Image: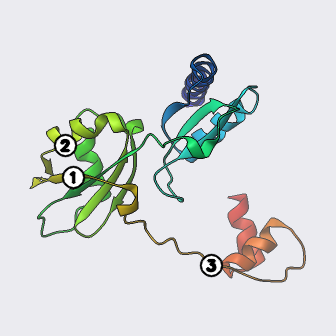
Amino acid sequence: MADEFAETTKELASRINSLAERALKEKEPQWSDFLEPPEREQAQAILGWISGVRFNSFGGYAKAERRRMVVYPDYYIVETIEPALAYLEIQTKSQTALTHRDYLGSLMGLGLKREKIGDLLVGDLTCQIVTVPELVDFIQYNLERISNQKALIQEIEAEQLNIPNLREKVIKSTVASLRLDAITAAGFSESRTRMAKEIKA
């Protein structure tokens, strides 16, 4: 497992370094595949040591989990960079709710790589997909069914995404110390003893 993780990290480092090299050589923004948060943290750590480039990430909406990183020459203004993203909406006539797994499984069944697909926003009757622009036509022409249900697919704009409401709760509390068990106990309304056991576990 450790060897596999090390190899994955090495491959990511190689890809990120290549993006930076191309950005400097071609003097144009270069895009990664979709990355999970831990991968983006690794990429940011690598890019922080490379002079002459800057970076940002885009996933279609502010709280997107899977995002593409863009690496660009440091004289670029990030606001002028058009996100290399596309958006599709899938509709079916299914009488039962289809799941994230149903939609993702059908996409993977086309032979697509997971890193080419961003977040899937699953609603009651639809699923909206963030993907790379070069796959739009392929998905529209080849994705015919989701879990045996006929699929109707159309390209949409970012403004049409049904972004989920992320619930946040602000907790104000006075703790005796800044120990981790004290802070988590206040946050989860549990005893310090129990939280200490959970932390050690």
In the rendered structure, find residue 169 and report the number of the disc placed on it: 3
Residue 184 versus residue 21 in the image, above or below? below
Residue placed most toward the observer, 153 or 148: 153
Distance from disc 3 to disc 1, alpha carbons, whole Å, reads 36 Å
Q: Are marks 3 and 1 in contact (CB under 8 Å)?
A: no
Q: Report, in whole angstroms, how far the alpha carbon at label 3 lies from the one at label 2.
A: 40 Å
Decide: marks 3, 2 in contact (CB < 8 A)?
Answer: no
Which mark identifies residue 59? none
Residue 47 rendering spot, x and y as whole percentages: 69, 31
Residue of label 2: 140
Query: Where in the figure is residue 113, as x and y percent of width and height?
Result: 35, 34
Image coordinates of residue 114 in percent, x first then y, are: 38, 38
Of mark 2 and mark 1, the one earlier in the sequence is 2
Along the horizontal axis of the image, is 78 left or right of 63?
Answer: right
* Dots 2, 1 in contact, CB < 8 A: yes
Please name the residue shown 26% across and 46% down the image: 105
Q: Residues within 10 Å of mark 3 (few under 14, many from 20)?
A: few
Q: Is residue 129 at all visible to an observer of this figure?
A: yes
SS at mark 1 in the image: strand
**What residue is drawn where x is 65% and y is 35%?**
76
